[in-house]
């Protein structure tokens, strides 16, 4: 009888564990998409990421290499450089561009990344391509370069302040932001448009249209453009914000930054979202309201995905530990 009682107790405990797991799973499902650390090869730091599609993407930052996403896993791709990738912009899965901290420009032709120019020896912070034959770069000392006619050419800049981010709405409208500066491109020249309301360093800009956009920066700064002016909006943090990614239409967006901070915009306000890391997050790239990536210090890679994907990662270890 003692043996049967122990067996009954074991079965009861096992049933309770299964019920608890089911309830916990149901609770996770009710929360919607979530950010989770995603397995990736070792990397010191990752400063940039861009996804050509859900099944194709690149991340950079570590010296001499990049990480490649093939739709199933991240792998290391070594480059013929000894510098660090600072920015990446994929035109499509077979055409991409990147910049380094020593002024190199790399091009991806669908097979490999190769250095195709070095218009400066200074830090090139960001790059955006409007198409295969038209693009822009900004960087240290207020430098601006335009890709046209098959080469990168310097463009007159109205500032010597460090420029950190650029976003072109189209060939005739664009914005660049940086250390206490906001620049506007009107189709013919770059002009000083404004200084941030509290003189912050503005680290990232993402335009929704030529009449609406968002930017983030140091000390939790969040700026909104309404077609006329850039104004500060309420921020739930005082930590530095380093990157922003808005979905088309502007009803949703995410910003990341210091100490693993993640903010989410719900169409009305910015709120702090759950984060699985305390590492600084340097870049975020959202594909949809249920899919996105972020990268940062110590080579951390985060994935934003739906509950089904999160559950299997989160609960497999628990199920394994419950086995005899």
Image (spheres, grey):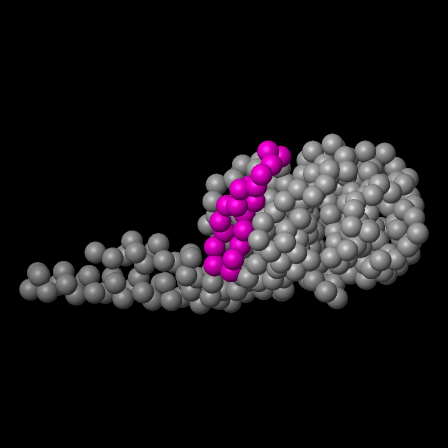
Q: Which x, y percent locates residue 196? A: 84, 43
Q: Which x, y percent locates residue 323? A: 25, 57
**Image side of residue 49 versus residue 119, left or right:** left
Q: Is residue 249 above or below residue 301?
A: below
Is residue 128 in sight in this rendering?
Answer: yes
Which residue range is magenta in the image? 65-83
Residue at the image point whose x is 74% and y is 32% from the top? 121
Asked if the magenta segment contains residue 75, the reply would be: yes
Is residue 281 in sight in this rendering?
Answer: no
Residue at the image point whose x is 57% and y is 53% from the top? 111
Task: Determine the image quadrant of residue 114.
Answer: top right
Q: Which x, y percent locates residue 156? A: 90, 41
Task: Determine the image quadrant of residue 45.
Answer: top right
**Image side of residue 150 versus residue 64, left or right:** right
Which one is in front, 257 or 9? 257
Residue at the image point whose x is 73% and y is 45% from the top? 126
Which one is in front, 193 or 41? 41
The image quadrant where one finds the N terminus is bottom left
The image quadrant where one finds the C terminus is bottom left
Residue at the image point whose x is 72% and y is 41% from the top? 117
């Amino acid at each position: 009888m003692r043996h049967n009682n122990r067996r009954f107790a074991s079965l009861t405990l096992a049933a309770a564990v299964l019920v608890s797991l089911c309830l916990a799973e149901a609770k996770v499902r009710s929360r919607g998409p979530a950010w989770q650390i995603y397995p990736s090869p070792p990397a010191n730091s990752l400063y940039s990421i861009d996804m050509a599609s859900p099944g194709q993407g690149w991340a950079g930052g570590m010296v001499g290499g990049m990480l490649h996403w093939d739709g199933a896993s991240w792998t290391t791709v070594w480059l013929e450089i000894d510098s660090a990738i600072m920015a990446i912009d994929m035109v499509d899965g077979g055409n991409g561009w990147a910049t380094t901290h020593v002024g190199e420009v790399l091009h991806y032709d669908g097979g490999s990344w190769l250095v195709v120019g070095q218009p400066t020896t200074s830090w090139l912070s960001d790059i955006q391509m409007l198409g295969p034959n038209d693009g822009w770069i900004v960087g240290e000392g207020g430098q601006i370069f335009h890709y046209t006619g098959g080469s990168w050419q310097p463009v007159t800049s109205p500032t010597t302040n460090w420029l950190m981010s650029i976003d072109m709405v189209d060939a005739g409208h664009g914005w660049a932001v940086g250390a206490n500066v906001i620049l506007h491109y009107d189709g013919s020249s770059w002009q000083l448009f404004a200084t941030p309301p509290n003189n912050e360093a503005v680290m990232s800009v993402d335009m929704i249209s030529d009449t609406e956009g968002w930017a983030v920066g140091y000390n939790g700064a969040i700026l909104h453009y309404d077609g006329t002016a850039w104004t500060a909006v309420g921020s739930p943090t005082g930590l530095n914000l380093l990157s922003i990614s808005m979905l088309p239409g502007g009803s949703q967006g995410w910003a990341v930054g210091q100490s693993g901070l993640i903010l989410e915009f719900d169409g009305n306000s910015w709120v702090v979202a759950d984060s699985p890391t305390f590492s600084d997050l340097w870049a975020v790239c959202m594909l949809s309201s249920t899919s996105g990536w972020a990268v940062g210090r110590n080579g951390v890679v985060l994935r934003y995905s739906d509950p089904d994907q999160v559950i299997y990662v989160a609960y497999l270890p628990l199920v394994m530990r419950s086995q005899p």
